Image (cartoon, helix red, strand yellow):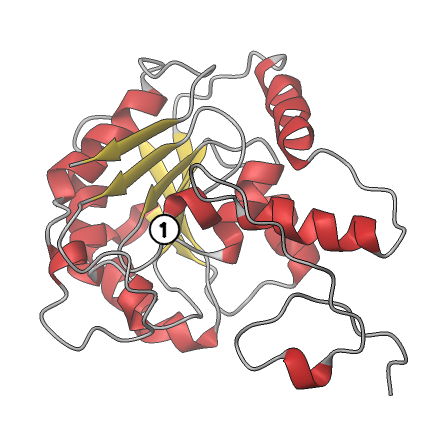
Amino acid sequence: GIPRRVGYRGHWRRWLLNQIPPQPRKPGPPEHHSLRFLRIAGDCGAETLNAQRSTLNAQRLRETSNLKPQTSKIGLCPGAEYGPAKRWLPERFAEAAAQIGAQTPAQWILFGTNIDAAIGEKIGAVIGNHCVNRIGQTTLDQLIDEVRQCRLLLTNDTGTMHLAALLGVPVVAIFGSTEPRLTGPLGNGHVILRHHVECTPCFLRECPIDFRCMKAVSAQEVADAVLSILDDKFQKTTSLKIQI
């Protein structure tokens, strides 16, 4: 077994831990989870890096390469391992992709795990020849290489979203049951689409009612957010959160 198990209390993990650092309580807005995890590492004696600074360095590296291909390579991650409450409607992903493709040349690359296969097939059938379906076909190293080549990533609140942000790839992220102030992409130049309804954030894996938070996000506003980045109309020095 692992001799040293460190973490904060909560989610029934207390009985698995043998070192529980005090969890600071600060007034003000919620703290991003990355800062909490870095604090735990620091309490263990590890040297920690500034996660925000790492993403900014990656973004600056991308901006120095003035490559603007005629066809934009756009990553699309339609799944979410946590559960269906974090997944935008597949037909709306397809509709948004069609609207974007009608205005600018785009090559779509679908990312995800095997459990997203049916969703990927549904979206890929609508996009057609302008889509490469890589769902369930990439190792982590391959995913890193392929996401790095994308002009941006359109995604739910996923691990691939955080990977793209770390690589300096702009993200258009759709949030529903979760809270972007806690788990949103780090760095600048991202667009977060989220509609406030009376029950968000619920943090549930499955919606027990009518999925109103995700249904409120339209394909048109997602397409507009993607096009704002592709057309360089979005200010790269700010992280925009669209909350409607």
Point out the image quarter for the C terminus.
top left
Nearer to the camera, 238 or 73: 238
Name the residue: 62% across, 15% down: 65
Q: How many marks?
A: 1
Q: Is residue 243 above or below residue 228?
A: below
Crowd rating for badge 1 (residues with CA inside 10 Å; few <14, some 14–19, many 20+): some
Nearer to the camera, 117 or 83: 83
Nearer to the camera, 13 or 2: 13
User: Which quadrant would residue 90 be assigned to in this image?
Assistant: bottom left
User: Which quadrant would residue 200 be assigned to in this image?
Assistant: bottom left
Q: Is residue 113 left or right of residue 59?
A: left
Residue bearing the label numbered 1: 179
Mark 1: which amino acid?
Answer: Glu
Give x and y (percent) for residue 138. Answer: 59, 63
User: Which quadrant would residue 199 be assigned to in this image?
Assistant: bottom left
Q: Is residue 230 left or right of residue 41?
A: left
Give x and y (percent) for residue 68. Answer: 47, 17
Point out the image quarter for the N terminus.
bottom right
Give x and y (percent) for residue 78. Answer: 34, 58
Name the residue: 63% across, 56% down: 23
